[in-house]
Amino acid sequence: MMSTADQIYELVKAMPEQESRLVLVFAKFVINQLNSERQPVSGLLSDYLGILKDSPNFNEDPVELQRAMRNEWS
């Protein structure tokens, strides 16, 4: 009897490249979901400190960003 991994391998080998990439993307998604479920959530705001530091939306002067956001509603 073949293992699940061997069965998946045989199926993917027979697929065109584009479809086999979808299988890979799905497998990575499943792994990511499992890893995120295992990470404990502390509920502390400090866990989010710096999470947007590399965001293109927040790389400007924070005061100017706030002014621009306020001006949108004026």
Image (tube, rainbow, N blue to C red):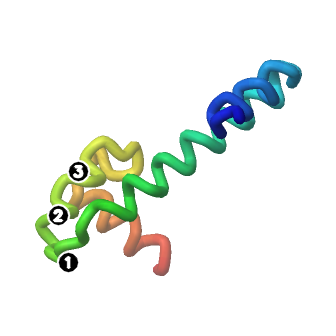
Q: Residue at x 25, y 47 (%)?
A: 53
Pointer 1: residues within 10 angstroms few (<14), some, or many (20+)? Answer: few
| Disc nearer the start of the sequence (2/3) | 2
For this view, does 74 lie left or right of residue 10?
left
The residue lying furthest to the front in this view is: 1
Q: Residue at x 38, y 64 (%)?
A: 37
**Label 3 to label 1: alpha-carbon separation:** 28 Å
Query: Which x, y percent locates residue 51?
Result: 26, 54
Query: Which x, y percent locates residue 44?
Result: 14, 75
Hey, what amino acid is under mark 3? Answer: Asp
Q: Nearer the viewer, residue 13 or 61?
A: 13
Pointer 3: residues within 10 angstroms few (<14), some, or many (20+)? Answer: few
Q: Which residue is mark 3?
A: 61
For this view, does 73 lie left or right of residue 19?
left
**Label 2 to label 1: alpha-carbon separation:** 8 Å
Above or below, 60 against 24 in this view is below
Q: Which residue is mark 1?
A: 43
Q: Nearer the viewer, residue 22 or 3?
A: 3
Q: Residue at x 81, y 29 (%)?
A: 11
**Label 2 to label 3: alpha-carbon separation:** 23 Å
| Disc nearer the start of the sequence (3/1) | 1
Q: For the residue labelled by badge 3, is the local secondary structure a helix, a strand or a loop?
A: loop
